[in-house]
Image (spheres, rainbow, N blue to C red):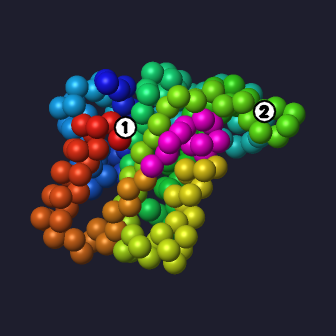
Amino acid sequence: MTAKILILNGHPDPVRKGLCHALADAYGAGAVEGGHEVRRLDIATLAFGFVHSQAEFEHGSAPTDIEAAQASIKWASHVVVIFPLWLGDVPAVLKAFLEQTLRPGFAYAYRPSGFPEMFLKGRSARIVVTMGMPALVYRWYFRAHGLKNLKRNILRFVGFSPVRDTMLGSVGTRSKEHIGRWFDDMKALGRRAA
């Protein structure tokens, strides 16, 4: 079955082509090999600012690049979010992108019950997070709080399901061979649209 895949590279550096960029390339290459349609957004290259108030979040108009990103999210059946762990969480530019993009009216609507009407149901997601610490330390000692927030309180809140994750730890000490296996794994996930 052919999937429509949107790859969101959440690394905040718009110039340097590092590990997150290469992982996005590998996932995209695998997806194309698997016969899937692929779109990609490198978030750091988009023009948008921070949301500064609840009124702006709920009623403000989205910047042009954000409107285009929303159209790609609507188009997608599967969204891949790739980012480096910064201070235990997503980088600020990725959080700002999510706040700009997943606004009420586009991603969900408030209901009197307190539970949202989810407008992005029918889409799955894969989160790929890189980090300097061992992935097991982040998952078990720190309880992966930033990853859990993105999974549960953001993506699932607006309807994404299932939301799976891949954590790649100790990135600064891995051999080229080990990182090469990560690229192979990303290609395999892309082929399966998983």
At 20% from the left and 37% from the top, the residue drawn is: 29
Question: Of all residues shown, which one is farthest toward the right?
Answer: 112
Q: Where 86 sits versus 103, above or below?
A: below
Residue for badge 1: 7
Residue 181 lies left or right of residue 65; in this view the side is left
Q: Which mark is residue 94?
A: none
Report the span colored magenta. 154-164
Q: Quadrant of residue 44?
A: top left
For disc 2, the marked residue is 110
Amino acid type indicated by mark 2: Tyr
Q: For the residue carrying disc 2, how many other residues have a C-alpha within 10 Å: few (<14), some (14-19), or many (20+)?
A: few
For the C terminus, the quadrant is: top left
The tally of labels here is 2
The image quarter in which residue 160 lies:
top right
User: Magenta span has 162?
Assistant: yes
Residue at figure coordinates x 37%, y 25% from the top left: 4
Q: Is residue 114 left or right of residue 87?
A: right
Identify whether 50 is placed above or below 64: below
Q: Residue sitting at 26 percent across and 48 percent down?
A: 186
Work out which quarter of the rendered image holds the N terminus and state it.
Answer: top left
Q: In the structure shown, which secondary structural element does the residue marked by tag 1 occupy? A: strand
Q: Residue placed farthest to the front in the image?
A: 1
Magenta span includes 4: no
Q: Is residue 182 left or right of residue 102?
A: left
Across and down, in percent, residue 115 comes to 77, 39
Residue under the point 39% across and 32% down: 6
